[in-house]
Amino acid sequence: MSPRMGLTLPTIIQAAAEMADQEGFDAVTLASLASKLNIRTPSLYNHIDGLSGLHRELTLLGIDQLYRVMAEAAHKHHGADAIRAMSHAYVNYVRSRPGLYEATFRMPDFADADVQQTGNRTLELVVEKFQECGLEGEDAVHAVRGLRSLLHGFASLESKGGFGMPLDADESLRRLIDTFLLGIQHAVPK
């Protein structure tokens, strides 16, 4: 069977990403995606390897987009200022692309070489910025893990309505990042 004219992998992935952002990652099924694209479900198999293949593509797209917004935010900054900029970019990405962000950690096979390669770019970027703060080797990797946990936790709580008090969430985020960076400064070997 030949692929339907006009239906391409990028078109399919874009539609799936929009659906994930609007309706949630779990709402993206082959049947719901086919309905959105006004095609029959079997037509998707000409472009993707089932639901797991679709999830893989969404994971790669989400990781790549998150890397790009963080790299762009860090571009003109150094050290702690770059980490602050990347952190705000991370949370803003989650705010604007919640379903696609969820795809970044819902991958069925994190041993996938393409997923690892795409994710390693983000790791290398953030490690570099922590190195500019004086952290090296394992210390820098531990700092990356801490920052990721902090940002994921903040963004996840916010997305689920966990910050109901009438205080500016961006101010809370700023203070949280500054506190984390202050702790990192004290952890740097003198």
Image: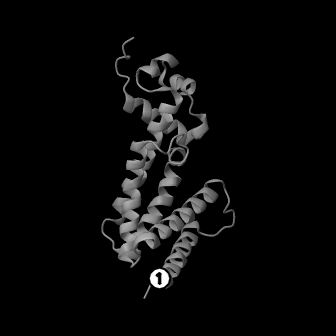
Question: 179 left or right of 4?
Answer: right
- Residue with the mark numbered 1: 185
In this view of the protein, can residue 61 be seen by the observer?
Answer: no
Question: 169 left or right of 114?
Answer: right
Q: Is residue 100 above or below residue 83?
A: above
Q: Is residue 187 above or below residue 128?
A: below
Residue displayed at 51% across by 49% down: 101
Task: Give 82 or 121, whichever is nearer the viewer.
Answer: 121
Callout 1: helix, strand or loop? helix
Residue displayed at 44% across by 84% down: 189
Circle 1 residues within 10 Å: few <14, some 14–19, many ≥20? some
Q: Which image quadrant for residue 125? A: bottom left
Quarter of the figure that contains the C terminus = bottom left
Amino acid found under the numbered disc labelled 1 = Gln
Q: How many marks?
A: 1
Residue 26 lies, in percent from the top left, at: 61, 37
Residue farthest toward the bottom in the current orientation of the protein:
190
Q: Is residue 82 above or below residue 17?
A: below
Residue displayed at 37% across by 61% down: 124
Residue 25 lies, in percent from the top left, at: 57, 40
Task: Give 60 or 27, whichever is nearer the viewer.
Answer: 60
Residue 173 lies, in percent from the top left, at: 55, 69
Looking at the picture, the colour scheme in use is one colour
Residue displayed at 47% across by 37% down: 56
In this view of the protein, can residue 133 be seen by the observer?
Answer: yes
Task: Give 106 or 40, whichever is nearer the viewer.
Answer: 106
Question: 173 left or right of 49?
Answer: right
Residue 1 lies, in percent from the top left, at: 39, 11
